[in-house]
Amino acid sequence: MIRQDRRVRTLATCLSALAGYVDALAFLHLGGFFVSFMSGNSTRLGVGLAEGSRHAAIAAALIGIFVAGVVAGSLVGRMAKAHHAKGVMLLVALLLTAAAVLNLVGVPKAAVVAMALAMGAENAIFARDGEVQIGLTYMTGTLVKLGQRIADALNGGSPFAWLPYLLLWLGLVAGALAGAAIYPLLGLNGLWIAAACAFLCVPALSAR
């Protein structure tokens, strides 16, 4: 990520915040399941299987839907070619809008499906040659990189190479904080805010 320019790093932090916001809405709505943090769902899958709980089925379904979103985002990005990032971002915005509409008409389960698809697709925005360059909805790897860059700095390396990773993580946390604050007021209707923010990001990605 440190090889990306400041504009890309700023956009990545904003999109990470979007992921945190959507994930917080889903987490509170589903009672502890995620639409972007698949490590958490994988743990819930394992625990659910051990306990013989229906939670295993919920976690497995969300994981499958998320992967389908990654596939959809990757395919759209390839079709968009030079406008890869813009095309994928538009898909994310449309999926979040669909989620908001589905919730509005009284189909919240379908809304959650659209949310998980959107979060999977979002990870294809910063992809090159089929490989993700910046992970937007999961932070374990980002925190590992943060620790490694701090170690490098303490060993005489670049003194601020860790900063982009910290900002990316803080973006997700800030988005989750906003989602958690909005949910008691709007519930899943807070998705309209996420959809609007996603559409605002489309032009900013037009040059990628």
Image: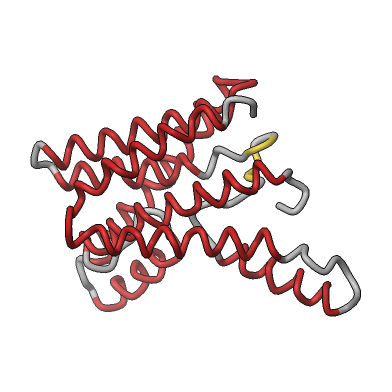
Is 136 on the left or on the right of 188, as rendered? right
Q: What is the x, y in percent for residue 135?
A: 58, 52
- 162 or 144: which is nearer to us? 162
Q: How many marks?
A: 0
Q: Is residue 199 above or below residue 185?
A: above
Q: What is the x, y in percent for residue 3?
A: 78, 48
Which residue is pictured at 29% across the width and 64% down the height?
180
Which residue is pictured at 55% across the width and 38% down the height?
125
Is 46 on the left or on the right of 6, as rendered? left
Instruction: Tell me which colouring the rendered structure shows.
Output: secondary structure
Is 130 on the left or on the right of 103, as rendered? right
Q: Is residue 73 above or below residue 158?
A: above
Image-quadrant location for residue 47 = bottom left
Image-quadrant location for residue 149 = bottom right
Which residue is pictured at 54% across the width and 39% down the height?
124
Which residue is pictured at 64% across the width and 48% down the height?
9
- 170 or 101: which is nearer to us? 170
Q: What is the x, y in percent for residue 8?
A: 65, 42
Q: Is residue 198 above or below residue 187?
A: above
Image-quadrant location for residue 148 = bottom right
Q: What is the x, y in percent for residue 150?
A: 75, 74
Image quadrant containing the C terminus: top right
Work out which residue is located at the far right of the displayed protein and give it: 156
